[in-house]
Image (cartoon, rainbow, N blue to C red):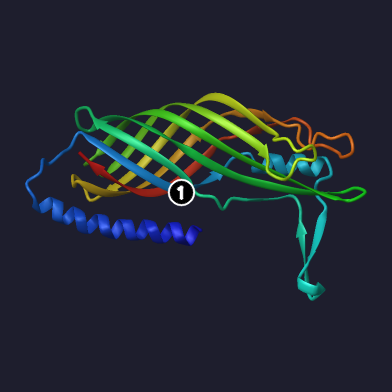
Amino acid sequence: MKKLILTILISSFIITVSTAQESQSSDIPKLKKWSVALHLGWQIGGPCKQIEDAMVNHGFDCSKRVYGWFGSSSSVTHHPYSENFIPSWMISVKYYLKPPFSIGIAGGNTHLGSTHGYKIQTWGHRLDIDYSVIHISPIFSYNSYDIVRIGIGPSVYFTKAWESSDHPEGVDVEYKHTKVGFLIDFGLRIPKKSRFFFELNAQYRYVGKAEIGPFNENPYRDMLPKTEVKYNHVFIGGGFGVRF
């Protein structure tokens, strides 16, 4: 999946540059007030380490041997472990006030990852927890030559954590919170002042702490109790957009 997204981003960059060169040759204004961009990327950080620590403290740290077809080979998986293979997305809108300043708004859905634990009782039990955050952020930015951008603004975050494995009672287990934090935004757009552009983007998002759990709440199995985790993370992505 990551290779596919990277291929799409590189292809978009090549198409954008070639289209922008054509646009620059046409009679269009040198600087456009509005722009819209769509980004795809991944995150660094989030609550994975704290969820892993909680799983270790409550016994969800057993190893599991997985056998191949007809028992021909096997491998050992050590728990807990975290992974993040689902890309995140963000859309942003920017309006130039008076150069070099602009205002805008950004929002999107970030899949922060999933953490897996395994505990041996009378039978083995696996616990899978996914977590994500949706954000909406107004941003005030300083733009250098319509290429480099740095901005900051308040953010509203909607955090979510849920048990992705089958719940023993057949019900969905999820925990949602609304948090207020802030965002620091860095961007690089090329080519400058063209109608179409390619953009690299990095954001530090301060979300704060949220309480999740309990998970696996069943009288016949040990559960993972309430745990306080931090949702702070860095988003790194790329995408393309249009000025108008």
Residue under label 1, please give it: 41
Q: Residue at x 23, y 56 (%)?
A: 17
Q: Residue furthest front?
A: 170
Disc 1 residue type (three-letter): Gly
Q: Residue furthest bottom?
A: 72
Task: Determine which quarter of the picture holds residue 212.
Answer: top right
Left-right relation of 222 to 230? right
Counting from the top left corner in percent of width and height, residue 217 is at: 81, 34
Left-right relation of 187 to 169? left
Left-right relation of 129 to 184? right
Question: What is the secondary structure assignment of the residue under circle 1?
Answer: strand
Q: Residue at x 84, y 35 (%)?
A: 218
Q: From the viewer's side, name the closer residue of 17 and 99.
A: 17
Counting from the top left corner in percent of width and height, residue 157 is at: 52, 29
Above or below for 172 versus 42: above
Q: How many marks?
A: 1
Above or below for 121 versus 4: above
Counting from the top left corner in percent of width and height, residue 62 is at: 83, 52
